[in-house]
Amino acid sequence: MQTTRRLVIIRHAKAEPWAPSDVDRVLEERGRVEARMLGEWLAGQGVVPDAAFVSYAARTRETWAAVAGGAGWTLEPAYDGGLYGTDEEGVLDLVRGVPDDTGTVVVVGHNPTMGMVVQLLDDGEGEASESIALGTFPTSTAAVFDVGVAWAQIGAMQARLRHFHVARA
């Protein structure tokens, strides 16, 4: 029996423009509200993660907390220092390491990487493929993919974009 796999790529919510370091930037109030809205939307789509990877930056950790709160998720994510500065291949390497019986994986990270991952994975056949424009992946956005290959095999054009949602207050 094949496991239905779903991958959700999330860009962190709107953050403060300044902090002592970029890693320390926290969410603006608008970001907290929109991240919670994004979680509510994801719950409405039936998304319940079995695994989650979240960049260790303050804004991504806060985004996860607000999204999870809005969605009613209780999963403890893996906070990953590599997600902060990695490229698309680094994100896919994380996903490739997920056990094959894992159904839904959520990744919360930063642009331009999250937007590039979405562009890279999209097979162009999903109902939401027309929703994204090259180079755009705003804050508080989620791309929900169906994945038809084993996690270890995920790569370019190997996922179908089912939903693309930008949460705005």
Image (cartoon, grey):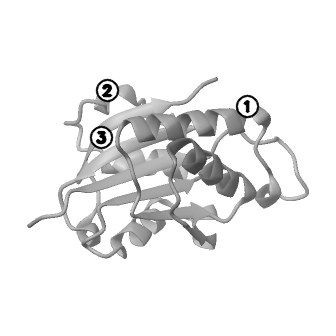
> Residue at coordinates 87% horizontally, 46% vertically from top-left?
18
Residue 164 lies in what quarter of the image? top left
Q: Left of 99 or right of it: where is 20? A: right
Q: Secondary structure at mark 1?
A: helix
Check the image and report above or below for 149 versus 114.
Answer: below
Residue 66's disc number: none
Residue at horizontal 68 percent and vertical 33 percent from the top: 33
Q: Residues within 10 Å of mark 1 (few under 14, many from 20)?
A: some
Q: What's under tag 3, amino acid-wise?
A: Leu
- Which of discs 2 and 3 lies nearer the camera? The answer is 3
Residue for badge 1? 30
Please provide percent x and percent y for residue 84.
63, 63
- The N terminus sits in image quarter: bottom left
Q: Amino acid at mark 1?
A: Arg
User: Helix, strand or loop at disc 3?
Assistant: strand
Q: Earlier in the sequence, mark 1 or mark 3?
A: 1
Question: Horizontally, is 47 left or right of 61 in the view?
Answer: left
Q: Is residue 16 among what the camera can see?
A: yes
Q: Nearer the viewer, mark 1 or mark 2?
A: 1
At 57% from the left and 46% from the top, the residue drawn is 67
**Residue, far right:** 20
Compare marks 2 and 3 and give the one earlier in the sequence.
2
The amino acid type, in three-letter code, at marker 2 is Glu
Read off the residue under disc 2. 130
Q: Which residue is mark 3?
A: 161
